[in-house]
């Protein structure tokens, strides 16, 4: 369970604005975090985000396959992303690195920037503490839940190879 | 219930008699690909997890194409990481400066992808190889690392949208116009999680280069992959390139499609996408005359020989307008050589274009043509997101090579028919 302040963005948030290509040669997640979202929100990377929550509209994370995108968001301190829908490569990348994402169109619509929101990853329950509204995100299929339980795709694979 | 082409390929690689949309499967991979941006991240997680061998050094391709020849020290470090990994595991298909081309042009050219194969690449435009009737899709670096370690990966079997192509395209209408038109029709998430299955009598009218361009931009509609039937054009293309046995699949007659989009190729006009989404499309006649500063002809979308020929046919005996910078980037060494042998290089240089080494460069605002504040480019690349080619207040208009070349000559967004 996490509780944090919401940073909300619109539809079709692409990986070029999440982390512009000019920073893809940055050597570390912390370096990437310094430039996260800067092309649409110059203030985002200037404040610490320990446990905050990012909310997006439809097709969040579209565009490039750069895993640098979920890495940058994660390294900026954001606890999870809630969106109406995710672009598929971003969705895979987030699961593969063990970064929590929740698909919930109703929550993505109703939650406003600045709201305080609690998320229970286990049940997929999202509660807007500011408005009192409660939402239910789609559950992960058991196969994906298993990858997340191992902490990502590679620990899962390694355990299986050794198993 | 019958299967689509994509579903048949995935079933065969998962060792299953059949699959249906929504099934989660683990499929064997015929090729795992990465570039200079995504491979170093894959190397890091590969090593951190403690893997000590790759599944097959002959089925991994690493291409240093994005920021090469290295634009700065950080990029050089990334290339060094990828290069050392390739050496450590004797990666057979490793391409460095001098041999490298833009990944999605080079892999088919070298025969590294055959019909009905399954390919993952740590680059979103990996979906390009669907032009060959293969299942190929873009993934991230962790997926690449997993693929290199195990030779398998997990997939959710996609449902499908059928794209029925009919008729024959008019002069100056190319694969780029077809795919921009389609994205304009269905939107940037119109095919989210789904496969785009191209079919119809119009397919035979499209060259392999046109098909590569169309499949390449399937991702811009959110698709998992885009795939073409295997026909005489495909067989002719792979005949001289692929030197291993290959097979092909046709969709079942009762394959299930969520929806069908029909495109009459005869009715299409040269089409462009205005900033800042590939779905923001207009026909050229609706928007010609817009002011521009730069023209880019190249990329994994449109850097192939027929793209070079289309641009050169317009630039021959003409010059780039004052105040316009025209950057021509053949996608591979072989295409560069063909340009030289066919006299295209001379046409470009005499017209006042700059003729580059193969690189992804300006497409993603990397190098070789970044835009300043307030500048606008007409580009044959694939994305026109905010800041894609440089400054966040610069703009990219996506277009075919013919429209791009015509625009370079006219000095504004222009139609090739008006020259």
Image (spheres, coloured by chain):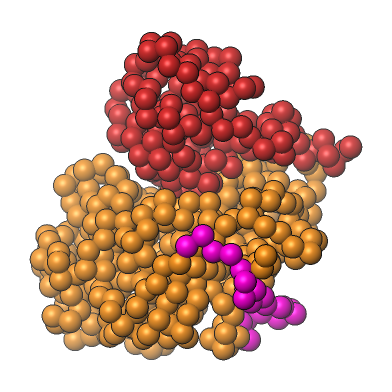
Rendered view: B357 above or below A5: below
Q: Colour of chain A?
A: red
- What type of secondary structure mainly makes up the magenta span? loop
Extreme residue in the right direction: A163
Q: Which residues are magenta?
A: B237-259
Q: Position of residue B226 (x, y in %)?
A: 52, 65
In which image quadrant can residue B273 be found? bottom left
The verdict on residue B253 being magenta is yes
Magenta stretch: includes residue B271 = no
- Note whether B343 is above or below A86 in the view shown: below
Write the residue at 63% across / 38% down: A96
Residue B22 visible to an observer of this rendering: yes
For the point 19% across and 86% down, the residue is B317
Q: Is residue B120 left or right of residue A107?
A: right
Query: Relative to A115, does residue B15 appear above or below in the rendering?
Result: below
- Identify the residue at image location x=55%, y=40%: A91
Q: Who is closer to the viewer here, B345 or A69?
A: A69
Colour displayed for chain B in the image of the structure: orange
């Amino acid at each position: 369970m996490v509780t944090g302040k919401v940073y909300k963005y619109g539809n079709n948030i692409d990986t070029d604005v999440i982390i512009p290509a000019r920073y893809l040669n940055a050597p570390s997640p912390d370096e990437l975090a310094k430039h996260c979202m800067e092309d649409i929100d110059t203030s985002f990377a200037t404040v610490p985000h320990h446990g905050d929550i990012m909310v997006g509209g439809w097709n969040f994370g579209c565009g490039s396959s750069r895993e640098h995108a979920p890495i940058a968001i994660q390294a900026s301190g954001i606890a999870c992303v809630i969106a109406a829908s995710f672009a598929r490569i971003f969705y895979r990348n987030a699961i593969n690195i063990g970064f929590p994402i929740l698909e919930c169109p109703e929550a993505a619509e109703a939650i406003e920037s600045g709201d305080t929101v609690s998320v229970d990853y286990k049940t997929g329950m999202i509660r807007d503490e500011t408005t009192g509204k409660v939402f239910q995100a789609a559950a992960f299929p058991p196969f994906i839940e298993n990858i997340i339980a191992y902490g990502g795709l590679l620990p899962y694979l390694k355990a299986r190879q050794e198993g | 219930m019958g299967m689509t082409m994509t579903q048949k390929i995935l079933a065969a690689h998962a060792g299953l008699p059949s699959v249906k949309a929504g099934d989660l499967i683990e499929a064997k991979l015929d090729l795992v690909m990465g570039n200079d941006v995504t491979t170093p991240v894959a190397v890091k997680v590969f090593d951190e997890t403690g893997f000590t061998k790759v599944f097959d050094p002959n089925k991994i391709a690493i291409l240093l194409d994005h920021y090469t020849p290295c634009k700065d020290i950080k990029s050089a470090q990334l290339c060094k990481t990828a290069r050392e990994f390739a050496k450590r595991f004797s990666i057979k298909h490793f391409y460095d400066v001098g041999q490298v081309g833009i990944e999605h042009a080079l892999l088919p050219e070298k025969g590294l992808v055959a019909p009905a194969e399954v390919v993952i690449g740590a680059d979103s435009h990996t979906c390009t190889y669907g032009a060959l009737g293969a299942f190929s899709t873009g993934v991230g670096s962790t997926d690449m690392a997993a693929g290199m370690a195990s030779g398998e990966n997990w997939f959710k079997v996609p449902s499908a949208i059928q794209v029925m192509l009919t008729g024959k395209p008019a002069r100056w209408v190319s694969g780029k116009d077809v795919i921009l038109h389609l994205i304009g029709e269905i939107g940037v998430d119109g095919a989210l999680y789904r496969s785009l299955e191209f079919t119809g009598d119009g397919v035979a009218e499209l060259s392999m280069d046109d098909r590569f361009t169309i499949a390449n931009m399937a991702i811009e509609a959110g698709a998992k992959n885009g795939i073409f039937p295997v026909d005489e054009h495909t067989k002719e293309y792979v005949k001289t390139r692929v030197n291993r046995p290959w097979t092909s699949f046709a969709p079942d007659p009762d394959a299930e499609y969520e929806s069908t989009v029909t495109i009459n190729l005869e009715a299409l006009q040269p089409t462009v996408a205005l900033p800042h989404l590939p779905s923001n499309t207009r026909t050229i006649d609706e928007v010609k005359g817009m002011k521009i500063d730069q023209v880019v002809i190249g990329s994994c979308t449109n850097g192939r020989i027929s793209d070079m020929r289309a641009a050169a046919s317009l630039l021959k005996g003409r010059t780039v307008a004052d105040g316009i910078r025209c950057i021509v980037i053949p996608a591979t060494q072989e295409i560069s050589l063909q340009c030289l042998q066919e006299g295209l290089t001379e046409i470009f240089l005499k017209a006042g274009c700059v003729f580059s080494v193969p690189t992804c460069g300006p497409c993603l605002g990397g190098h070789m043509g970044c835009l300043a504040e307030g500048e606008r480019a007409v580009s044959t690349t694939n994305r026109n997101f905010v800041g894609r080619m440089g400054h966040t207040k610069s703009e990219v208009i996506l277009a075919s090579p013919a429209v791009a070349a015509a625009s370079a000559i006219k000095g504004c967004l222009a139609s090739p028919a008006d020259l």
